[in-house]
Amino acid sequence: MRKLDPDKHAARRGQILNAATQCFAERGFHQTSTAQICAAAGMSPGNLFHYFPSKDAIIEAIVLEDSAAMAARSAELAREDDLRAALRRMLDEALASLADPLYRRISMELMAEAVRNARLFALVAENEAARRAGWRRLLQGAQAKGQIAAGAEPELLVDALLVQLDGVFSRLLLDGDFDLDRYRDLLEQQLNSLWRAA
């Protein structure tokens, strides 16, 4: 039996997920065929099904990969000394994702499909829990280091932050004139005010 090359396997898997993400964002989940994903990934159907048995498995893997990436990034930032700066970096990265039209389209497609698919809904809920946990880890770490007020409520601050980010997502989807750059500074000021007041 031929030995599996884990790096090559991961690269091919990533190639499929990237191609599928693009296809799902452009055409929608149900309008995208496996043949279209194969064409975008540059591989045969047999090769694709070696990695993923179905379209459902692909879309589930997209969510799982995103959750893992969020957890790894928040863990990396949590090791920094200045966690206020780490929080600002995490905010900048979140806003950069929201500014990406592909990210917005695939997010909408995932949420729409999750309403119809109980397993995917559970994975999307876990993804949201991972997002919350990442922010909470940084806020609790900053509090332990005395970088935000001892009386701050990390859960409340996480909710306030995510409400803001979800609002940005909606504005970018619905308002073609929404200026994210102008809003970025205001969001940072509001968060700083929350931290000081907490």
Image (cartoon, rainbow, N blue to C red):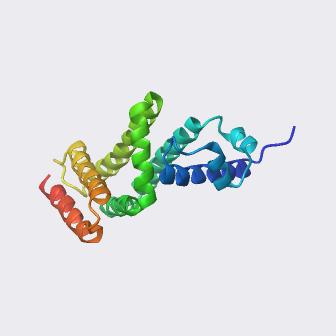
**Residue displayed at 49% across by 43% down:** 63
Q: Residue furthest top?
A: 118
Counting from the top left corner in percent of width and height, residue 134 is at 38, 47
Counting from the top left corner in percent of width and height, residue 169 is at 31, 55
Image quarter hosting the N terminus: top right
Counting from the top left corner in percent of width and height, residue 23 is at 55, 52
**Residue displayed at 24% across by 45% down:** 159
Q: Which residue lies furthest to the right in this view?
A: 1
Q: Which residue lies furthest to the left in this view?
A: 197
Q: Which of 113 and 86 is in front in this view?
A: 113
Can the viewer see residue 126 in this picture? no
Counting from the top left corner in percent of width and height, residue 143 is at 26, 51
Is the residue 35 above or below the residue 197 in the image? above
Question: How many discs mark residues in the rendered view?
Answer: 0
Asked if residue 141 lies left or right of residue 25, the reply is left
Asked if residue 23 lies left or right of residue 130, the reply is right
**Residue displayed at 21% across by 59% down:** 191
